[in-house]
């Protein structure tokens, strides 16, 4: 059965068998909540269906998850289990973001990180193309030790891509420009979270300042036809996470998701999980949800899937 047939007959098992990518996934929250519960041996409170933005999400994370996911052992479990979840979902290219603070888990810092990442790549090599991404939190742009560590990680060639996240207001893109310049020189793919909640002009500005290849979220670009045209001309891909946008109330519901406007204006889009532990929808389920909500027909979703694979596997680092 092909992808179009699988979607139009609502056959999730068949959808899962067809190759796809996940290029917006944060390792710390990358596995299903059920898997964490099973590993811990006890249930956890579910996230509310609507949270007030990133602050609302962090309230839930701090109240329910933090104690269980910030130890070295639990992090190792979550990242490995997240990769297994992706494999079971038919993900063949997985760009997973690893926060630079991970180095604090190891007495030898980046040496430990390297052996951990190399181990993961090796363990799952036959099942998925795992491309580790250096994650840097905007809240720590003025933390000189962490910034130095991120620079060193780039020099050591530990990561194939870089991502910037956390509250957009926490630092302007200029604050990380030297880090991104170094990542560019090292041949890494450049990504950053921007325009998850607002605004179109800041999406374009961040792409220009950091010379981004791709944007994580970026859905606020849909407010401006001019910015969408600009993204389309420059073929800047937006890595969209529909359920995340709905649950964090950036978008009222799936049917109203601006991914439709972005696609219609020629902006390259991909469909991704963000934080499977919180949003609970695999890439296959996200495709199915968009189909069921009438946002795209099956042929359009297959176009998006195929384009993400072409871009995912044609990368020279692959
Ligand atoms: Zn994200």
Image: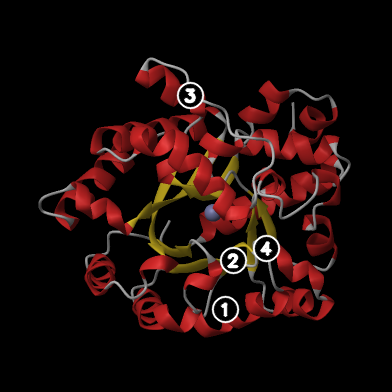
Residue under label 1:
206
Name the N-terminal-most of marks 4 and 3. Answer: 3
Q: Which mark is residue 197?
A: 4
Q: Is residue 184 above or below residue 98?
A: below
Residue under label 3:
44
- Residue 35 can be seen, yes or no: yes
Viewer-side label of 1, 2: 1
Viewer-side label of 4, 2: 4
Q: Say which of 34 and 85 sits in front.
A: 34
Which quarter shows the C terminus?
bottom left
Q: CA distance from mark 1 to mark 4?
A: 14 Å
Report the colour scheme. secondary structure
- Residue 128 can be seen, yes or no: no
Which residue appears at 32% of the width and 38% of the height? Answer: 75
Q: CA distance from mark 1 to mark 3?
A: 37 Å
202 sits left or right of 155 in the view: right
Residue under label 2:
215
Ligand 1 falls in quadrant? bottom right
253 sits left or right of 56 in the view: right
Q: CA distance from mark 1 to mark 2?
A: 9 Å
Name the N-terminal-most of marks 1 and 2. Answer: 1
């Amino acid at each position: 059965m092909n992808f179009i047939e699988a979607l139009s007959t609502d056959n999730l098992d068949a959808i899962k068998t067809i190759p796809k990518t996940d290029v917006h996934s944060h390792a710390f929250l990358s596995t299903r909540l059920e898997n964490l519960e099973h590993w811990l041996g006890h249930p956890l409170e579910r996230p509310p269906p609507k949270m007030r933005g990133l602050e609302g999400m962090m309230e839930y994370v701090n109240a329910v998850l933090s104690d269980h996911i910030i130890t070295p052992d639990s992090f190792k479990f979550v990242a490995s289990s997240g990769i297994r979840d992706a494999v079971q979902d038919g993900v063949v290219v997985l760009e997973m973001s690893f926060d630079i603070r991970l180095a604090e888990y190891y007495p030898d810092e980046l040496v430990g990180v390297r052996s951990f990442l190399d181990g993961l790549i090796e363990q799952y090599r036959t099942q998925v193309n795992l491309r580790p991404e250096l994650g840097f939190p905007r809240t720590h742009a003025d933390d000189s030790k962490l910034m130095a560590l991120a620079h060193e990680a780039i020099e050591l060639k530990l990561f194939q891509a870089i991502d910037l996240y956390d509250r957009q207001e926490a630092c302007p893109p200029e604050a990380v420009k030297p880090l991104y310049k170094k990542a560019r020189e090292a041949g890494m793919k450049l990504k950053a979270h921007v325009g998850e909640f607002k605004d179109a002009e800041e999406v374009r500005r961040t792409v220009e300042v950091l010379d981004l290849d791709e944007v994580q979220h970026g859905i606020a670009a849909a407010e401006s036809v001019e910015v969408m045209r600009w993204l389309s001309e420059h073929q800047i891909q937006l890595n969209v996470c529909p359920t995340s946008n709905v649950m964090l109330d950036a978008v009222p519901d799936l049917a109203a998701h601006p991914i439709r406007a972005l696609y219609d204006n020629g902006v390259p889009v991909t469909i991704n999980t963000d934080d499977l532990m919180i949003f609970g929808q695999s890439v296959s389920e996200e495709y199915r949800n968009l189909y069921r909500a009438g946002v795209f027909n099956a042929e359009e979703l297959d176009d998006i899937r195929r384009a993400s694979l072409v871009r995912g596997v044609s990368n020279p680092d692959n």
